[in-house]
Amino acid sequence: MAGQSAKKIAKEAVKYKSIYLYIMMSCILTHFVLKGLYNPSKLLGKSGIGLTIISSIYFFTYSNIKSRLEMGVGYSMYQDVYILNSLVAVLSTISSYFWYIFLLIPMYIIYKIGKLIINWVFTPEPVS
């Protein structure tokens, strides 16, 4: 019976890894086609730098999600960054202002740290 859980985790990991891979490839391809091939002269400038940033974030988040899926542990923070990166990859083809979505990441980190500090400061003392 103990092997059933491991088999189920492995089966789900294969399924979700392929889903995340397809999303990553389609977003990178969309960004490359609409930004790079539409105006190839910009591919060595801002569009190339943007594609490099997006691809780097995808590589980092996808590899961490993949390893977390194989271990069977949570990966929600990596998934949040992955989703934000997907939004930026697709929407930045419309306007460069969508790059500001990446500002949500440091704001989220500040929120999490602030929440930890507030919970620590306002924890009542145990009564003896």
Image (cartoon, rainbow, N blue to C red):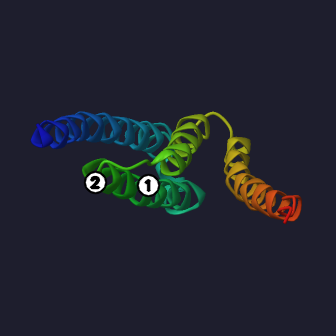
Point out the tag, 2 or 1, that comes first from the N-terminus. Answer: 1
Q: Position of residue 4 (x, y in %)?
A: 13, 36
CB within 8 Å, label 2 to label 1 = no
Q: How many marks?
A: 2
- Determine whether, in the image, residue 123 is placed left or right of residue 13: right
Question: What is the spatial separation of the Cα atoms under label 2 and label 1, in whole angstroms?
Answer: 15 Å
The residue lying at 47 percent from left, 41 percent from top is: 31
Query: Camera-side residue: 16 or 127?
Result: 127
- Of the residues shown, which amino acid type is indicated by label 1? Thr
Q: Which residue is mark 2?
A: 71
The image quadrant of residue 121 is: bottom right
Horizontally, is 46 left or right of 14 in the view? right
Q: Judge whether 119 appears above or below 5 on screen.
A: below
Residue position for label 1: 61
Q: Is residue 97 left or right of residue 86?
A: right
Q: Residue at x 53, y 36 (%)?
A: 90
Q: Is residue 104 left or right of residue 29?
A: right
- Measured as percent of width and height from the top left, residue 67 is found at 30, 56
Q: Residues within 10 Å of mark 1 (few under 14, many from 20)?
A: many
Dot 2 surroundings within 10 Å: few (below 14), some, or many (20 or more)?
few
Tell me the quadrant of the picture where the N terminus can be found: top left
Say what secondary structure mark 1 lies in. helix
- Residue farthest toward the front in the current orientation of the protein: 128
Q: Between residues 72 and 40, which one lies in front from this camera angle?
A: 72
At horizontal 23% and vertical 40% (from top left) the residue drawn is 9
Q: Amino acid at mark 2?
A: Met
Q: Position of residue 112 (x, y in %)?
A: 72, 55
Q: Which of the pair 124/67 is nearer the observer?
A: 124
- Above or below 53: residue 75: above
Q: Nearer the viewer, residue 35 or 50?
A: 50
Secondary structure under the numbered disc 2 in the rendered image: helix
